[in-house]
Amino acid sequence: MTLVRGVLIAVVISLAVVLQTSVLSGFAWRGVVPDLALLVVIALALTLGGRVALPVAFATGLLLDLVPPADHAAGRWALALVLAAYVAARFRPEDRTGPSATATVATVAACSFLATSVFALSGLILGDPMVPVSDLLWVIAVAVAIDVLITPLVMPPLLWWLRRFSHDPQPDLSPMRG
Amino acid sequence: MTLLHERPLRRETGARPGRLGGRPPGDPRGPRRATLVALLLASATLITVDASTGALEPARQAAGAVFGPAESTAATVARPLTSIPDWFRTQSDLTDQVAALEEENDELRGQLATRPYDRAKLASYEGLTRTAEQIGYAVVPARVIGLGPAQSFSLTATIDAGSDAGLRPDMTVVSSEGLVGRVLRVTASTATVLSISDPESVVGGRVGDSGEAGFVHGTGGVGEKTRLDLELLDQTEVPRRGAPVVTWGSNRGAPYVSGVPIGQVTAVYSSVRDSSQRAEVRPFVDFAELDVVGVVVPSGTESDRAIIEADGELR
C-alpha cells in the first residue's frame, strides 16, 4: 500500500513539474509562471502532514533545480520547498475534514511568498542573478498573486483526491492517543 | 508542573495544542524537526557543492534526458492551448496606449483568431529560412518547449533539438527576428538556451552604422519594456538613436557568430564624471513569445532533422 502510494505521489509530482516547465510557461504573465509543483506540495502537507510532505518537497525542489531549463545552483528550490512544506504542515487541521477554503488560500499565499522569497534570497547570498531588489520584490508579489489565483482551480480536486488517499485503512492512522 | 514531567520529552519540542493548526503533540504525521533540519542541511550542501564545483552536472544531464522528452510531448499536446494567452499578452502590452491603438488591436486580434495555426507555423519557418539566408549560416530549426519561470530570476528556455540534431553547447540561437541567445547544455533530444536578456549574459556587439564595438549585457525581464545594456568600448563616439546593434562574433563562432541583429539603440546616457557612454538597446526578440528558433551549426553537420542551409535550401 505504501509502495503504491509512493509511486502515485512520484507520478503526480513528476507530472506537476513537467506541466510547470513546459505547458504553464505558455500561460506566464510577464514571465512569472504558476507554481504548480509548490501547490501539490502544499496540498500534500495539508492532508498527509509533514512526515510525507517534507521528503516529497525536497524531491520536488530537486527536480525543479535539475530539469531543463533550470540553470541555477541545484538545491535552491529544494530548500525553498522544504521550508514551505514545513509551514503548510503547521496549518494542517487536526481532524480529517480538510482545511477550509480560507485556510487553504492563506496557506498558499504564505507558502508561495516564503518559497519564492527563500529562493530569491539564496540567489542574493550566492550573488547568482544580479537582479535589483525592487525586481525581486515585484516578481515575488506577482508570484503570490498568481498562485492564489490558480488555487481555486487546482487545490479543491487535489485536496479531495489526497483526502480519499489518506482515508485508506492505515494502521498508523488509527487514533491511539488517550 | 507534574503534568509536564509526566510527558515524554519529545512532546515538549513538538507543536503545542492551540498553536497554528492546533495539532496535538506527538501527532504521528506531524513534521519532525529532525527531518526538517536534515533536509535543509541537505539542500544547503547541494547548493554549496553545485555552486562551487558544478558537480551536479551529470544529475542535470540525467534529469534532462528523462524529463526533456516528457516536456516536449506536453508542450506539443498543449500548444493550441498555450497559444491562447498571446492574445491577452498583446492586449496587456498595449494598455498604455489603449485609446489610440484600440482599433489596431481589434484588427490584430481578429487576424490572430482567424489565421489558422499551421499558417503561423509555416510563416515562422519561412522567417527562419530568411534569417539563415541573411546571416549566412546553416541553422537547425527547433521549437521552444519550456521557459524558465521569472521566479528563478534567470531567462532560460528548453528547445526540442539536442545532440542528435547536431547541437553542442555554446552554439548561437537565432529566431526570425534576431539573436535569441546561446546553447548552455544539451541532452540527446533537448537543449537549454540562455537568453541574451539574462542578467548573466554578455554578447559582443557592434553598432550597425558606425561600427563601434561594445558589450551588450542582459538586464533580466521579458516583454515589450525589456532593455539590454550596451557598454561601448570607444567612449567618445555617441551612437545614433535607432541605430541597429549586431553581434561582432566570437573566436571561431562560439558562442556567438557575427552579424546577427541584436536590437536597436533606444537611448544613450553619458556619464560626465568618467566620460563613459551607455546605451539602452531594445532587443528584436521577445524571449517570452518565442516559438520557432534556429540553432546556428557548421555547414554539413550531421543531424536527425532537416537543416536550413545558408542559401535557404532545406537539406
Image (spheres, rainbow, N blue to C red):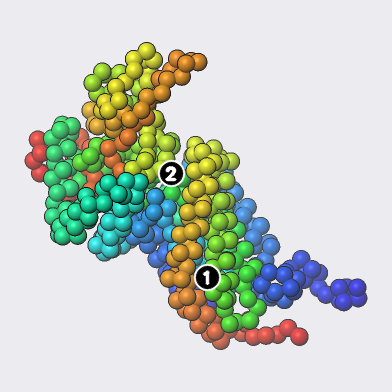
Decide: is A111 above or below B158. Answer: below
Residue name at image x 49 percent, y 59 percent: A145
Q: Which residue is drawn at 37% across and 41% down?
A: B225
Q: Is B252 rendered above or below residue A47?
A: above
What x and y, as percent, mark residue B269? 41, 23
Amino acid type, callout 2: Ser
Locate residue B101, reporting x and y percent.
Answer: 26, 48
Residue type beneath disc 1: Ala
Residue B182: % across, % down: 32, 38
- For residue B267, which quarter of the picture? top left
Check disc 1: other Cα within 10 Å, few if <14, some if 14-19, many if 20+. many
Q: Residue B299 carries which label?
A: none
Q: In this view, does B181 lie to the left or right of B27?
A: left
Residue furthest out toward the front: B99
| Image mark 1: chain | A
B285 or B188: nearer the eye? Answer: B285
Residue B226 is at least partly visible in this image: yes
The quadrant in which residue B211 appears is top left
Residue sitting farthest toward the top: B236
**Secondary structure state at the residue bearing disc 1:** helix
Q: Which residue is drawn at 58% across and 82% down?
A: A97
Q: Quadrant of the C terminus of chain A?
A: bottom right
> Can residue B50 be spotted in the picture?
no
- Rendered residue at 50%/82% (across/down): A164
Q: For this view, does A47 lie left or right of residue B167?
A: right
The location of residue A59, given as percent across then percent down, is 51, 60
Side of A68 where A139 appears, left or right: right
Residues B81 and A81: in front is B81
Mark 2–mark 1 Cα distance, whole angstroms, equals 27 Å
Say what secondary structure mark 2 lies in.
loop
Q: Name the residue under label 2.
A: B154
Q: Which residue is labeled 1 in the image?
A: A43
